[in-house]
Image (cartoon, rainbow, N blue to C red):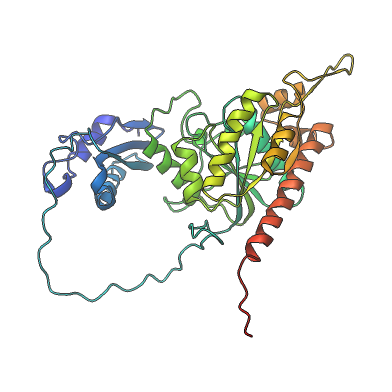
């Protein structure tokens, strides 16, 4: 059964606005509504000063839309803006009526998710370590690097998952040759897709490949949060997060709110790419996420007919930058036609040609990533000061 935007709008008209003044549709608080494969996405604009108290409004809107026949899931985000959205003239909140003191509610029986060792960020149950693979700009082969590092970790005997955090340009369905939609056992938590021994989640599984994602930042952040925390990931040794390029809202939110064990920076050798890679590295440092190291992608080219090596984009720039910044250099990946071809076919080189030269390079990088993760874990565990009585 198809779901229409009109049906969604009519249901949303039953949701009263803040302070019971009209409904959220007539108040102009509802964004453009996006419907794809029985999944409904939209945001509600609220004033920035009152964003924290508007969660019941968001939940009510989600609840009435989910009750529409044919709706499989609903994603509603709050967009907080200082101006616009029809909320400038909203009246101040009404004072709550005085009621007799009530007994405090009982604590929930379930335990909260574990916290990060050092930052207090809420962890994801079943995941031992979360690693971000990032770049300061697009076009440097970050997603291909991320998926082959994930496969390299799996080849080294670890349980690995991949979260495609690039909402606007998801790559994992094509790179891993996965088609279809994720299923849910209880209607709340999604089961990740599977291929090559990896557990995978991507917005590309939820919408068609050619459907543009025209979303504001808060909706992107909401989608990332759900794909991270409402997916049946565990048990995993490592979750590799393929970050979107750049240093915008999505990247900063992941760095600030997710207990990242470390970040891998991908760059090409030339100075322009290294400038952008430096920005990404500094972003992680500012939010106290350890930088595991730098990978130089498209490092050199070997002509297949002559065997002659060409440094098309220069060579060694990422290694020098790693030395200058005091971070580990994880390895060089050549500009190789076979890597591109196998990626386009949904057969990453580590899985398609596990004994090939390129696969060995990725497995070696993955081994260094795991080694650095253990070093960071040891350093963090040993950072607790000892109390000496004299």
Which one is in front, 145 or 73?
A: 145
How far across and how far down the image is residue 124, in percent?
A: 52, 56
Return the residue found at the far bottom. Answer: 390
Return the residue found at the far front. Answer: 390
> With respect to residue 73, does 167 lie above or below?
above
How far across and how far down the image is residue 174, in percent?
A: 60, 29
Q: Is residue 174 left or right of residue 31?
A: right
Q: Residue at position x 31%, y 38% from top?
A: 43
Which one is in front, 121 or 323?
A: 323
> With respect to residue 303, does 43 lie above or below?
below
- Taking the image as drawn, is residue 139 in sight? yes
Q: Quadrant of residue 374?
A: bottom right
> With respect to residue 377, does 47 lie above or below?
above
How far across and how far down the image is residue 333, in percent?
A: 75, 31
Q: Is residue 24 left or right of residue 147?
A: left
Q: Quadrant of residue 180?
A: top right
Return the residue found at the far right. Answer: 306
Which one is in front, 303 or 61?
A: 303
Q: Residue at position x 32%, y 33% from top?
A: 3
Q: Is residue 153 left or right of residue 247?
A: right
């Amino acid at each position: 059964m198809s779901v229409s935007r009109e049906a969604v709008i009519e249901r949303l008209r039953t949701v009263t606005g803040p302070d019971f003044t009209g409904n959220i549709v007539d108040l102009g608080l509802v964004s453009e509504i996006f419907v794809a494969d029985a999944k409904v996405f939209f945001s509600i604009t609220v004033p920035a000063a009152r964003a924290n108290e508007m969660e019941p409004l968001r939940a009510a809107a989600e609840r009435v839309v989910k009750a529409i026949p044919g709706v499989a899931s609903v994603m509603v985000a709050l967009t907080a803006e200082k101006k616009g959205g029809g909320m400038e003239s909203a009246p101040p909140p009404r004072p709550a009526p005085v009621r007799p003191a009530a007994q405090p509610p009982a604590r929930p029986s379930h335990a909260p998710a574990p916290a990060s060792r050092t930052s207090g960020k809420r962890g994801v149950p079943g995941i031992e370590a979360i690693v971000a693979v990032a770049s300061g700009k697009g076009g440097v082969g970050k997603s291909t690097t991320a998926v082959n590092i994930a496969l390299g970790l799996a080849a080294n005997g670890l349980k690995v998952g991949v979260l495609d955090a690039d909402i606007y340009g998801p790559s994992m369905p094509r790179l891993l040759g996965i088609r279809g939609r994720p299923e849910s056992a209880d209607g709340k938590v999604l089961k990740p897709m599977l291929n090559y021994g990896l557990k995978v989640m991507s917005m590309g599984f939820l919408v068609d490949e050619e459907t543009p994602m025209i979303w504001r930042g808060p909706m992107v952040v909401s989608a990332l949060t759900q794909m991270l925390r409402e997916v049946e990931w565990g048990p995993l040794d490592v979750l590799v997060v393929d970050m979107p390029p750049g240093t915008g809202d999505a990247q900063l939110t992941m760095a600030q709110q997710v207990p990242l064990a470390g970040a891998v920076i991908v760059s090409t050798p030339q100075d322009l790419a290294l400038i952008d890679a430096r920005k990404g590295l500094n972003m992680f440092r500012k939010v106290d996420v350890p930088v595991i190291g730098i990978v130089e992608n498209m490092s050199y080219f070997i002509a297949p007919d002559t065997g002659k090596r060409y440094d098309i984009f220069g060579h060694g720039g990422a290694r020098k930058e790693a030395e200058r910044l005091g971070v580990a250099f994880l390895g060089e990946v050549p500009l190789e036609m076979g890597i591109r071809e196998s990626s386009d076919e949904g057969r990453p080189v580590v899985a398609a040609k596990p004994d090939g030269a390129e696969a060995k390079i990725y497995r070696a990088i993955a081994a260094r990533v795991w080694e650095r993760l253990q070093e960071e874990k040891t350093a963090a565990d040993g950072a607790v000061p000892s109390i000496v009585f004299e």
